[in-house]
Amino acid sequence: MSLPSNLPINPDRLWASLAAMAEIGATAKGGSCRLALSDEDKAGRDLFVSWCEQAGCTVTVDRVGNVFARRPGSDPSLPPVVMGSHLDTQPTGGRFDGVFGVLAGLEVIRSLNDRGLATRHPVEVAVWTNEEGSRFSPPMMGSGVVTGVFALDEILDKIAQDGARLGDELVRTGYAGDAPIEHPMHAYLEAHIEQGPVLEVEEKEIGVVTGAQGQRWYEVTVTGVEAHAGPTPMRLRRDALVASARMVQAVQTLGLETPGDACTTVGILDVHPHSRNVIPGRVFFTVDLRHPDAATLAGMDRRFRDAVAAIAGEAGVTAEVADFWEFPPTPFDATLVNRVRDAAAGFGFSHRDIVSGAGHDAVYVAGKVPTAMVFIPCEDGISHNEVENISPADGARGAAVLFEALVATAGTV
Ligand SMILES: [Zn+2]
């Protein structure tokens, strides 16, 4: 659908800013490479800070390098309504993952300025440090420290794949700030590309994100008996790979049979001794179960364990299931989610409720502060890829919805 002419934001200015940011760390195939706290990440942050200062914002940097650009509100005693996302990318990243949420937030502030609109709450745009978790692990570090998921000192001592210490890289790039880690927020709104195909396939212009999926990760070790592939009759085998194959199938069936956006994945499988004429004696594989509802996810956990135990019994092998990591389902704030939905409807944009399958800074922030997200479609659902793409109209719609939800939350004078 064509774009309404009365949008509260400037689509051309937003698109030009996205293009200018993409020049920093541009890759041969049209993507971006700005690894966290690299020279390119510093250059991207510097450009963002200069734009914010031109827009009249006060910029502060906290001790883990998160950047906050503030436009004052009429009541300085009130905590800010914060928009934002991240500017770092994967090594072969796209031009929009994270960047869109940051620059859509800046576009909202520029548009408030254009209209001379004063808000009651201060309004901020946040750039969270190291969302991607590529150069430094784990991901979502900056938002994780601010929300108490990680301890500051532990994060400052993280070592990159290239041997650099995070705290030293903050100093080297000029982003070792002195603002305190505690950062009061009235609410948090993050715009982001969907990074999946649902909106495009269903021809929806806006995704109203109602929360994030819970995740449970496991490591499974199946042990049978290694034996010669010739002299060992089929009926006497205890083949760890054949049993594992049935378990992989059971994991897929679990995902297909569980209602309501279940996702189940086996991503790694190692076969021992990995020899073509030896019956495999040991197999290791990983399992990733996801669902937006905690009770359903707990039920998936039980069915998964039962299936593995039953198959192991039938196959005469043993199977050990180890918990590796888990993250609870995170529902977003109903009032804020309604504001996003109302904004999309108000502009006449086609929209649907959607659950985020990926991790985002908003997922950590939601643990402390009322939070919502706005998704826009991305071409073919592709992300974490140099060909990642959106249309200028998709970007404009997302920024317009962000503007309306922000104004409704920050209040006007
Ligand atoms: Zn992202």
Image: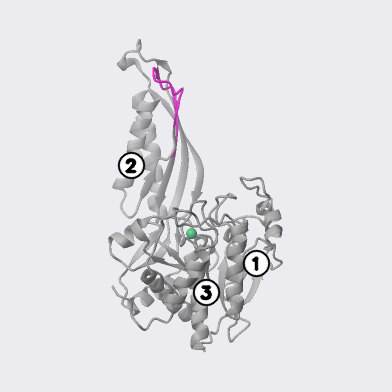
Looking at marks 2 and 1 on the same chain, the residue that comes earlier in the sequence is marked by 1
- Residue 285 appears anywhere in the view: yes
Looking at marks 2 and 3 on the same chain, the residue that comes earlier in the sequence is marked by 3
Assign a secondary structure to mark 2.
Answer: helix
Q: Residues within 10 Å of mark 1 (few under 14, many from 20)?
A: few
Q: Residues within 10 Å of mark 2 (few under 14, many from 20)?
A: some
Which residue, given by chain and number where applicable, does mark 2 sit on? 252
Q: In which quarter of the image is residue 153?
A: bottom right
Q: Hey, what amino acid is under mark 2?
A: Gln
Residues drawn in magenta:
270-286
Q: Taking 212 as reference, is 413 above or below it?
A: below
Residue 205 horizontal/vertical position (percent) = 33, 68
Residue 8 horizontal/vertical position (percent) = 42, 82
- Residue 189 appears anywhere in the view: no
> In the drawing, what numbered circle is on residue 106?
3
Instruction: Measure the alpha-carbon separation of dots 2 and 3.
Output: 42 Å
Mark 2 and ligand 1: say if the CB distance to the nearest ligand atom is below 8 Å: no
Mark 2 vs mark 3: in front: 3
Q: Hey, what amino acid is under mark 1?
A: Glu
**Does 15 sit left or right of 345 as displayed?**
right
Q: Hey, what amino acid is under mark 3?
A: Leu
Is 278 a magenta residue?
yes
Instruction: Measure the alpha-carbon separation of dots 1 and 3.
Output: 23 Å
Which residue, given by chain and number where applicable, does mark 1 sit on? 182
Assign a secondary structure to mark 1.
Answer: loop
Residue 72 horizontal/vertical position (percent) = 60, 82
